[in-house]
Image (tube, rainbow, N blue to C red):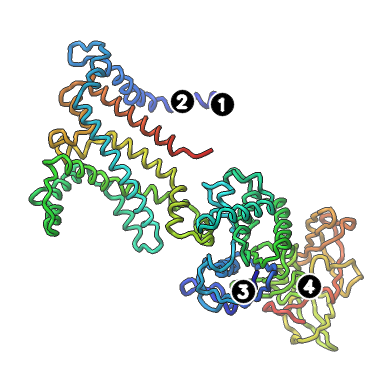
Amino acid sequence: MAAVTLTNVVKRFGSFEVVHGANIDIADGEFVVFVGPSGCGKSTLLRMIAGLEDISGGDIAIGGKVMNDVEAADRGIAMVFQSYALYPHMTVEQNLSFGLRMNGNPKADTDRRVKRAAEILRIDELMQRRPKQLSGGQRQRVAIGRAIVREPQVFLFDEPLSNLDAELRVQMRVEISRLHKELGVTMIYVTHDQTEAMTLADRIVVLKAGNVEQIGAPLDLYDDPANRFVAGFIGSPKMNFLSAKVVDTSNSAAIIELVNHGGARLRKPLRDAFPAIGAEIVLGVRPEHFFEAGEGDCDIPVKADVAEHLGSVSYVYANSGPEELIVEREASRQRASGDHFTVSIKAERSLLFDKAGARIR
Amino acid sequence: MRTQNATAYRFLTPYLLIFAIFWIWPIISSFIISFQATRTVPWRFAPAFNWGRLIGDPAFYNALKNTLLILVIQVPVMIALAIVMAVLLNSPLLKARGLYRFAFFAPVVVGEVAYSAVFRLMFSLDFGIVNKLLDSIGLPKVDWFSNVTPAMALIMIAVTWRWAGYNAIIILAGLQSIPEDVYEAATLDRVSRVKQFFHITLPLLKPVIVFCAVLSIIGTMQLFTEPFLITERGGPGGGTETLGLLLYRQGFRSLNFGYASAVAYTMAGLAITITLVQLWLMREPK
């Protein structure tokens, strides 16, 4: 087991910089998820930790030892690939034992490790099959098994569930979570799926265009995002962003006007910063933070466009002027499309962002 | 559905007719001819005439021996060379890859007569560059065309030069279909490059290599151009005569169509047998 520390890590492909000085501390035994949209550098960061990509700048340390120039095989890591990367011509058993056999590991120890991995992942009955005779979920188990037999200090997962169907993904998510508890080793997991990040992580690292936007526990990121990008990326359905303008500031609060909602006004208490009067800002409201008319600090009338009923909750896609709002409703209060209704915003359940996307607290 | 099929077959009829007349019929006809004595007029049915002669004909055994010798030595050497060339072509360190790919493939495009003439010049006893090179490093000159062993070696060199690049391009396509992350997984497993080649690359290339080997076996069984043009009709003294050349000599020089047909069927039978044995040996485990 080992802690992983990234200090000012930079990656350039030619003159093009894709990771701009990442600083991340991962504690021993922690489950950390790198999340972000395609091209944000999360997989590149993981591959640099694995030793499959060179580091253009900064340091990567595993277990307190700088690994920049250490061969991938000597870093004490194991990696599970998105495409599983199983050896197609070998049986499951051969896939699991290949690395150990090639390195002259004693047969008894190899057998013990393979057996243990097979038991943990419940793949004992598949040992003589080849990858093409396995389902996607089974292949993923074998890929994880191959990582387990290495008995690594750090597990790296590169979007391991993205090739599975929705149901299997949920099942494997639980398995990986269980595995982390069982093995207690450090795990770094890359995904673009914020649901995976929220459900698996001890801490989430949100990346955008090669920059670390925020690091924190899932609910901290959800409740207290550092900027508009994190606020929009974490949470499903995503946060609503309403264009607004500051019309007054007084008594530790700003009075803002929602420009696309008939000039509705909201008094938002602020702690640190006061934007100038007339400044264009953005008000963020999560779908579940719209209340019934009169319950909040500011009412806005909307028209239901489409309603999605999921059973326990319903999502109403409401049109009000040029901005579409997603409103979560309990199933019993569902709305049909075409309904006119009023939603209410509470100041304490909304967030403010400046025009550049930085949070105003 | 049936109407659709009928329409499709009507469209196919011109092709099928030509195919039947110029492909199917000659195949059947030569099989029949192989059981006929064709040096009498009219031809007469005599099953033992050609096939019996074949079994006892030293020229046939000489041609068979030469063909199999080329097959056994040249095909494995060429396939091994093609694999090495493909791996080099696939290397990320290689510059001007397109140029090399073209250069390796070019021999197939060159006309057979032209390349044979150049080979004859290059290996000429007195003027050839090969003997000049041997001479310059203090080795004795080789009379490539007058002795059997050098002449056989020359045939094998020529065939290898002509077809190794072609096979390398096919194997390169196979190499490029192996996903990169399989190698990355092996690198993380601390498997050396050499072991990766023998334990991952070669097994995954097996279907492509078998395909190349089958093509090469069929090609070598029919080998004709090189012994005809380079070593002058299987010379010296029939030392490089192949089954293809024997067939030509019997069929089109002696006009002994019955015997030539028997030789042709023997060649086809051998090619099929060797290919089937090879496919069986290289079959995928269940």
Quadrant (top left, top right, bottom left, bottom right) of the N terminus of chain B: top right
Q: Is residue B72 above or below residue A5?
A: above
Q: CA distance from mark 2 to mark 1?
A: 12 Å
Query: Which class describes the residues within 10 Å of circle 4: few (<14), some (14-19), or many (20+)?
Result: some
Q: Residue at x 81, y 87 (%)?
A: A249
| Residue type of the residue flagged with mark 2 | Tyr
Q: Are marks 1 and 4 in contact (CB under 8 Å)?
A: no
Judged from the image, the secondary structure of the residue bearing numbered disc 1 is loop
Q: Indicate which label's residue lies in the foreground, 1 or 3.
A: 3
Residue with the mark numbered 1: B1
Instruction: Kindly report the distance in space between the C-alpha atoms of the residues bearing marks 2 and 3.
Output: 72 Å
Disc 3 residue crowd, few under 14, some 14–19, many 20+, Cα 10 Å: some
Find the residue positioned furthest to the left. B126
Residue A312 in the figure: left or right of residue B37: right
Q: Of the numbered discs in the image, which one, if any, rests on residue B9?
A: 2
Residue at screen point 63% across, 54% down: A112
